[in-house]
Amino acid sequence: MGKQKRAPSPARSASLPRRTSETIVAAAGGVAKQLGVRTVLLYADGLEGPEAARKLVARGLRVVLVVRDSAPVGPDWDFTVGVVAVPAVRLSRLDQLKMAILFAVNQGLLAAGERFIGLVGWAGRPIDSMMVMRAGREWQVLEPTGLEGLYEDIKPAVFQRVLHLAVSLAGSGREGKPVGMLLVLGDTDGVLRYSSQMILNPFHGYTPAQRDIMDDALIETFREFAILDGAFLIHGDGRIEAAGVYLRPAVSGEPLPAGLGARHATAAAITATARCVAITISSSTGLVRVWRAGRGVIEIHPAESLLVEEPEQGAE
């Protein structure tokens, strides 16, 4: 008979995840010093407490804390420069950082072009990965691209809310079924000039407060209407203008990669036609794309992330 492996003691197993996280966080301080990096994006649920992160600040680093679905942040974390809330959806480590970068840039916590260190692990598990990255200009989704005030009417909090909902919906679907969507944010008057209703507008006749995407009471209604054909039009301040909208943009966007369909072509074209941002969910793959100025700029793939095997608790 082969020699059986001895199971680690419970005390040792419990200490491994904590030691892994603390070792990687400590190493990040040394890497930052050698590379001249001054900002660290840190997923809070990968640590048992703030002590390891506090040591980064003691070394002169800026710590941006990342939490999932607006998890409460206690006063023990008040040494961070800001907090970024991302969807509690299972994503690959790289996609987790994509979400954090996008929100941090649009909250002014990261500068476009800035190099930083990202510390991340599986959701709710220890930090097990350190990445040195640069926040390229493409992450400034709400900044002008040669046109003054291009996206001045889109509030960053509204953009983050809509993308948050899109990623969550792409990860869970609707009643277990994949959902395809096109969400158009900002310059609603301009977009309406190139649109018509495919069905009766389900948001017609409601007050602005009743159709505010920032209101948690509206989220289930939003999910119910996600199955409708056509686009959602959302004002930059969060008011939903309409759902079930057919768009006929005046110009085309940039050529699309093979395999992308009419929904993506429309997103590219409407963002080339009007001063808006679009977000698409692919019904076949679950891929979430952000579009601006006629092209896709960011991709996040919740469905693909679910195919990645999650490590067992306590595994190193």
Image: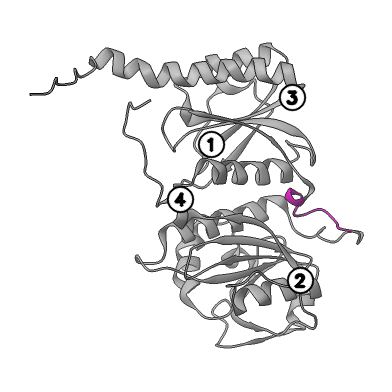
**Spatial CA span between label 4 and label 3:** 29 Å
Instruction: Report the residue marked by disc 4.
Output: 305
Against 141, is 191 above or below? Answer: below
Image position, residue 175 (x, y; %): 35, 66
Q: Where on the picture, by quarter, is residue 297? A: bottom right
- For the question of whether residue 204 can be seen, the reply is no
Question: Could you tell which of marks 3 and 2 lies nearer the N-terminus?
Answer: 3
Label located before the other in sequence (1 or 3): 3
Q: Residue at x 55, y 71 (%)?
A: 181
Q: Which mark is residue 67?
A: 1
Q: Are marks 3 and 2 in contact (CB under 8 Å)?
A: no
Horizontal arrangement in the rendering, residue 189 relative to residue 68 (left or right):
right
The range drawn in magenta is 138-145
Q: Which residue is mark 3?
A: 37
Q: What crowding class fits label 4: few (fewer than 14 Cα within 10 Å), some (14-19), or many (20 or more)? A: some
In front here: 227 or 178?
178
**Mark 2, secondary structure of its residue:** loop
- Please determine whether, in this image, residue 134 is positioned above or below residue 231: above
- Classify 298 as above or below 270: above
The residue tagged 2 is 254
